[in-house]
Amino acid sequence: MSEKPYKFDRIDRQILALLQQDASLTNQDLAERVGLSPSPCLRRVKALEEAGIIQQRVTLLDRKKLGLSLTVIILIGMDRHTPERFEEFGKRVSELEEVQECYLITGQEADYMLKVAVPDMDHYQAFLLNKITRIPGVSGVHSSFVLQRVIDRTSLPLGYLI
């Protein structure tokens, strides 16, 4: 049984765009900005949450001010391509707080791509040797170090909504 696609209107798109920019907006502020009274605005936000479109609201922190100035993109190859191997890798890597993103990928020599935040090269070396290479099945690691964040957004493009 497939889910019915959610039908978005102009106000839904405005609500989503505003919340992507600032999840701390009060319902009153949000309602004023989209031209609704608070009750209908809250109903729309609740409907978007219940539909799973709004998954969570987060606070973004400044990496550098927290001393996490090194971002590393890691490509990881696995020794075997079995569901058990992938499941174990996913479980183990999800326990590592340094890992910001993890993707199972195709089209590369690697099977996974990770984005990792650490304070410096010494911490990265310890992370790599004591955590990543100890995960069963990891057969190869290629690291790239981010020099500059040219684009670093968390918002999704809403122009495609139906």
Image (tube, rainbow, N blue to C red):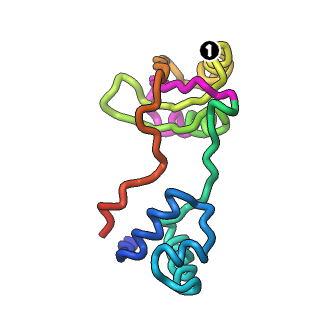
Q: Is residue 81 covered in magenta?
A: yes
The percent position of residue 44, horizontal first and vertical second, equals: 50, 79
Residue at the spot 54% in from the left edge and 72% down from the top edge: 30
Callout count: 1
Please provide the residue range marked out in magenta: 67-87
Residue 78 in view in this figure = no
Question: In this picture, is 25 found above or below 153?
Answer: below
Seen at 54% across and 86% down, the residue is: 37
Which of the two residues, 10 or 135, is positioned nearer the viewer here?
10
Task: Give the amino acid at mark 1.
Answer: Met
Q: Considering the numbered disc 1 on the image, is that residue within a helix, a strand or a loop?
A: helix
Q: In the image, residue 63 lies at what x, y percent?
A: 62, 34
Q: Residues within 10 Å of mark 1 (few under 14, many from 20)?
A: some
**Quadrant (top left, top right, bottom left, bottom right) of the N terminus:** bottom left
Q: Is residue 95 visible?
A: yes
Q: Position of residue 11 (x, y in %)?
A: 41, 76
- Residue 72 position within the rendered picture, expressed as x and y whole percent measured from the top left: 52, 24
Q: Is residue 142 magenta?
A: no
Quadrant of the frame with the C terminus: bottom left
The residue sitting at 53% across, 22% down in the picture is 138
